[in-house]
Image (tube, rainbow, N blue to C red):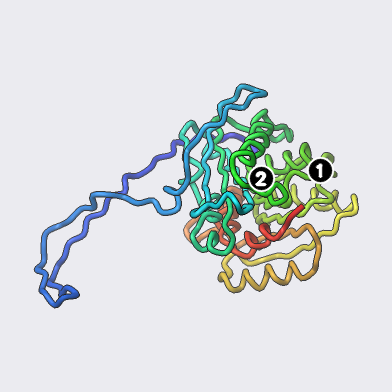
Amino acid sequence: YKQVKRDIIRQEAKVTATQVAPIKSVDGQSLMATGPQANTAVRNLIYEDFKQLVYAHPASGLKLKYNLFVPKDYDPSRSYPLVNFMHDAGVTSENHDQTLVQGNGAISFASPADQARRPAFVLAPQFAKQIVNDKSEATEELDAVIDLIKDLAKQYSIDQKRLYTTGQSGGGMLSIAMNIKYPDFFAASYLVACQWEPSVVAPLASDKLWIVVSEGDAKAYPGQNAITAKLEAEGARVSRAVWDGTWSEEQFRFAVADLEAEGNPIKYVALRKGTVVPAGQEDGPGSNHVNTWRIAYSIPGIRDWLFRQSL
């Protein structure tokens, strides 16, 4: 897992529309064709519902930027779960909201459909430097995120028996490291396209995990094979399945139900090579890696499973 320096360009959201023929209004009037009309405002749905905040970590002095979604109609008399989403190295940035605009990892948990089923807080830290490496080492940001969650639980009515962590690539690696260092802190974890040193993962043997990787991912796939083998050697019960990345939402729903029915606390899904990378992209390890994120966070059933877990 290496930091890759990229220029991330946000294109201006501009659109121009031209009415080419008269149209009838709802009250029966005829609206004549006009010249080009450009939009004057932009709405970023769901994204705009996150607050951009900064946490001053007392122990390290770190200033950790984070994005926080507070459930609409938040009621302090109720108790809410919290899911912590952590991004990959590709959006390491000083830009506060980079993690929100890169993909659907954090956004999926804050969607109106998900929130209608189960209102929840969504935390999305924004890291300004690389947080993990291929030596299975993590920076002090690990402790900062844990302490931030503890602090949020004091500010809001957050159920500390329903805390969850998830992340893609480096964010998934940091989730693994958190579970090793802070056992019994999270009720369950969703690990996407990530790996860690198998010899140190024994503390995860009693955890509830859902793992998704691509068979074409040169690091995460063999890495998770080794991790799950180690966890089974420690007595963990693991369910395995190979899924097609092009399945419909309904097909994924049935596949989730089948894996859950086995009753094992650790679920390990490999996306079949050749079904992960969209047409027009080279079907190589890198493309399999990054496209796993897109598919994994588009499966509602796994998010639902996550929120059914508790300590």
- Residue at image position (71%, 56%) is 210
- Residue at image position (77%, 52%) is 311
Q: Residues within 10 Å of mark 2 (few under 14, many from 20)?
A: many
Q: Is residue 253 above or below residue 125?
A: below
Q: Position of residue 66 (x, y in %)?
A: 53, 37
Mark pair 1, 2: CA separation = 13 Å
- Left or right: where 266 falls relative to 302: right
Q: Residue furthest front?
A: 77
Q: Secondary structure at mark 2?
A: helix
Q: Secondary structure at mark 1?
A: loop
Q: Nearer the viewer, residue 27 or 166?
A: 27
- Residue at image position (57%, 64%) is 117
On residue 142, which mark appears? Answer: none
- Left or right: where 47 falls relative to 161: left
- Left or right: where 245 falls relative to 311: left
- Quadrant of the snapshot with the N terminus: top right
| Residue 246, picture quadrant | bottom right
Q: Which residue is mark 1?
A: 201
Q: Nearer the viewer, residue 18 or 178?
A: 178
- Residue at image position (73%, 71%) is 258
Q: Is residue 111 above or below residue 11?
A: below
Q: Residue furthest top?
A: 61
Q: Position of residue 100 (x, y in %)?
A: 49, 45
Identify residue type, mark 1: Val
Identify residue type, mark 2: Gly
Q: Which residue is mark 2?
A: 172
